[in-house]
Amino acid sequence: MNTDNSIETNDLELLEFLVGGEHFGINIAKVSEIIIHCSLTPVPHASREVEGVFMHRDKIVTVIDLHEVLDIPKPEVERTLLIVCDFDQISVAFDVTTVKGIQRLKWTQVEMPPTITGNIDDSVATGVTKIDEHIMMILDFEKIVCDMNKGKDFELGEVGEIKTPDSFDFNRKVVVVDDSVFLNKVIVKELRKCGFTNIMSFYNGKEAWNYINKLKELPAGEGEIGVIISDIEMPLMDGLTLLRLIRTDKAIAKTPFVMFSSLIHENVRQKGDEAGANAQFSRSQLHACISTVIELMGGNGGKS
């Protein structure tokens, strides 16, 4: 599936699907294929959301029932569909009622889910948009998979100990931008474990850009940012747009910028390089990401 244009033009392509009668979406770049529901092998002691596993293209694929995850009754249909996704080293299929098709939008058309609907920490949605006359929720699939894995940071890898010189300034500002509440908190937690004390986190590029612009009004030195760690796909403003805005602003153009996303592959990496990213990492490379952050901020102990 070609996602080159969506990355370059600040558009996104969402696969729209139904769970019961409700509309949901997933970035097409995360989808490997769509198949008809097949025979599964049960997983002992798994949570009720995990239907089982099956072998597909020489990989063991875990099936998660989105009807159970979202507490939506499964309709009586002959066969449901499986949306097969790859999250770094993990292959997962999501059981959905049916697939509607591909919707092409701009990130500016996607809004943050309303916080009045509940605790944002428990939310499995990263965005919401209107398609024709109905609402479509964009789900936080990484959080769903991690929840099924008993909270283990299965795709982020072990950060472990990262050595830094005694003179390293852990109080320099670090800006984290990620629309996944779950992953945002994991990144911030690991940065704090390494010793960072001055971290600001945001759930989309627009919030981060507004904050960065306010920093420019502060006296010289007070508003300096040590590094920005950003996801790519986010509502309101995506990570590549945020990076381009920073690189074209003379006052902050040299700010170190690290991409940290499940969408890092050859085509996307090229776009990030062209936009001026200092480094790019997939979700399984959290140790390398934080090591590079320290290196970019002047720490010679950041190499792994």
Image (cartoon, rainbow, N blue to C red):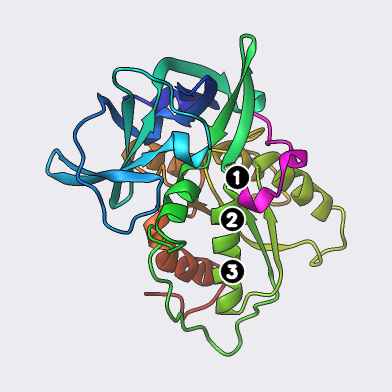
Q: Which mark is residue 179?
A: 1
Label 2, secondary structure: give it: helix
Where does residue 128 sit, x and y in percent of width and height? 63, 29
Q: Secondary structure at mark 3?
A: helix
Residue reaching furthest left? 58
Asked whether the residues under the numbered discs 1 and 2 touch, taking CB atoms below 8 Å apart as contact, a structural biologist would say yes
Question: Where 268 falls versus 296 (above or below)?
Answer: above
Q: At label 1, which amino acid type do we have?
A: Asp
| Depth order, front residue of 290/82 | 82
214 horizontally vs 287: left or right: right
Q: 71 or 125, which is in the foreground?
A: 71
Q: How many numbered marks appear? A: 3
The residue drawn where x is 81% and y is 55% is 215
Q: Is residue 56 left or right of residue 46?
A: left
The region drawn magenta spans 110-123
Which residue in the protein does label 2 denote? 184
Q: Secondary structure at mark 1?
A: loop
Residue 195 horizontal/vertical position (percent): 61, 79
Q: Are marks 3 and 1 in contact (CB under 8 Å)?
A: no
Vertical placement of residue 12 versus 173, above or below: above
